[in-house]
Amino acid sequence: MAATKKSILNKLYFVFVFIALFLVAIVVRLTNIQFADGEKYRNLSEHLTLRNDTIFANRGNVFSADGSLLATSMSQYEIRMDAFTVDSKVFEKEIRNLATELSKMLGNSPSRWEQSIRKARNNRNRYLFITRKLGYNDYIKIKSFPIFNLGMYKGGFIAEQSTVRAHPLGKVAERTIGYDDYRGAPGIEGAYRKYLKGKHGWRMKQKIAQGQWKPINDNNEREPVDGKDIVTTIDVNIQDVAHHSLLKQLEFYNAEHGCVVVMETKTGEIKAISNLGRNSEGKYYEKRNYAVYESQEPGSAFKVMSMVAALETGLIDTSTVVDTGKGKYRMYGRYINDSKRGGFGEITFARALEVSSNIGFARLIEENFGKNPEKFINILKGMHLNDKLGLAIKGEGEPEIPAPGDKKWSKNALPSISYGYNLALTPLQTLTFYNAIANNGEMLKPKFVKEIRTWDKHVEYFEKEVIDPEICSKETVKKVQEVLKNVVVRGTGQKLYDENFSMAGKTGTARKEYWLDDWASNRKYISSFTGYFPAENPMYSCIVVIHKPDIKAGFYGVDVSGPVFKDIAQKIYTSNHIINTIDNNTPNFASIKNSFDVYYTKSNKEFISIPNVKGMAAMDAISLLENIGLKVNFNGEGKVQDQSINAGVKLIKGTTIVLNLI
């Protein structure tokens, strides 16, 4: 009995000692956690339950030259509700009013909103979704609703802000304006991102049920700083004309894609740029920035470069005669053809450019430079035709002009280059050269951005950049300018001639993918027109390039791309972008003086009968008759041939007289 009792006591002592040691270990561990590792676990706890959420800064705006918005950041708000935190009395008093206001703004019935919020409150849902993608004005409005107007802590109102990029002009010039997101960073948005992006802010949030995060405070811990604004060189009116004119032509010719660029001659500023490609449904949109990236054989557009290089050597002049034969000429085992059936025969170098004779250029360049092709190629490269323009916009295509020793060089290389094959340039590189001719030899770097601004302050202004102050002699420039004017007056661009305004330029019709076996039965072309206007003292240069037009509708540059060029030039003229200088001195022609004297004598005479206005200028006759009280209608234009009321009939004011003009 005693032994059993002692055994029980020993076990109790053992259990007591074990429990005591266990308690001591717990105390030691708690002390260690509290003091030694306390900071570590507190940080870990905060890391698991608190976090900093980035508040993205609004990117700067992108403006056109006249201040129109091309790209802007818009705030959007997602609204949620902590339905559990609202005081019971306030909740019951205002829930129906809140539900009614939500119904008015967001749809659904008030009873459905009330039911949804009550259910969230019963389930202790502290992050009930209300709506998303609200604009700023709607955010301010919903914030004033009953209950929500009490704020986060008393009203359970939670607003999450984000920003989205918007293009007010839609798809117009979208690839050049660009973007900076998951798709990459092309265009102006990508090139000037360091100015546009701003500095992000942050907001502290706490983790709540079901992996949701709720802001701790009403205000942000650090406010975002918006980015700076970009003022581009784009003219919205010219851009609109260029875009729709190109689109119309692409649709008419069912072409694959095309581009147009308008540049201000004296500054290099890009006033318009449109790049349209076709999707699988046949609709055109800003698919790629073809003007900047697409290197291609320019075809006859390059003949201008060849002419400049040839004239600079002095070996050939615009008056040099070449025999183009009957339109077909064999050189190094292959035939070179001209577009005119029967050929042009003997013509001058200037005329060879006007009529775009491949044979004329191939023969003259080969005969004068065939033994020393490096001389010709080096002049081309000296005019920066083998150099990239160095644009801030990403993706500029690589120009290529082969030289002896290159893989592309052969006996046919030099004559091919002379009329625009066996080399590659982008449309913008081609336009830059033509603009230099229009600008009397000064080559300018294309300019897309005028300045950086922040509110009303100038941050940085971009001056014009001169690539070369003189790509060739003034004498050569003048000669080429005259020939380019004649291309429109009497050459391949004659269809575009308009006596009301002058243009100068060069048509281009280049074969595309001509190395394919089926080209003869499935012909493809690149149609272009490059030039400037007015022909004297040019203000704008322009290039239009259209790929793979339906050859059943047409494929020559003057037919496909030329009308786009003319349409742009014509609309710029008529919209007063170009102001013609008019001589204010009246010419002292006898006929004009006599006409004026007749009008002056009659207009100062008291009339009791209808005067004879036959033979008078319409302007004078109408003015005279209206001044004596008659109503005037007229047909035709010019001088008065006949009048509906004969001269000498008694004058009755208010009577209508009809004039027939010729």
Image (spheres, rainbow, N blue to C red):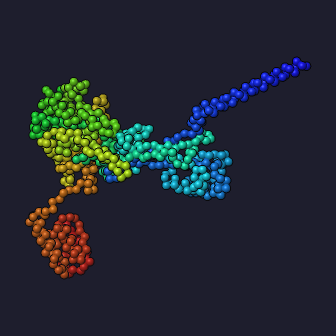
Which residue is located at x 89 percent, y 19 percent? 2
Please tell me which residue lies in front, 318 or 98: 98
Q: Residue furthest top?
A: 3
In the rendered image of this protein, does residue 522 appear above or below residue 62? above
Which residue is located at x 18 percent, y 42 percent? 441
Residue 165 % position (x, y):
43, 46
Q: Residue furthest right?
A: 1
Q: Evaluate whether residue 550 shows in this view.
A: no
Q: How many marks?
A: 0
Q: Evaluate whether residue 147 shows in this view.
A: yes
In the rendered image of this protein, does residue 543 appear above or below residue 136? above
In the rendered image of this protein, does residue 535 appear above or below residue 308? below
Which residue is located at x 69 percent, y 30 percent? 27
Please identify the quarter of the rendering in which residue 641 is found.
bottom left
Which residue is located at x 17 percent, y 67 percent? 617
Please tell me which residue lies in front, 495 or 64: 64
Please tell me which residue lies in front, 226 or 595: 226
Residue 567 % position (x, y):
27, 50
In which quadrant of the rendered image does the N terminus lie? top right
Residue 15 % position (x, y):
78, 24
Please tell me which residue lies in front, 305 or 656: 305
Q: Residue furthest left?
A: 590
In the rendered image of this protein, does residue 75 appear above or below residue 601? above
Residue 633 % position (x, y):
25, 70
In which quadrant of the rendered image does the C terminus lie? bottom left
314 on left or right of 518: left
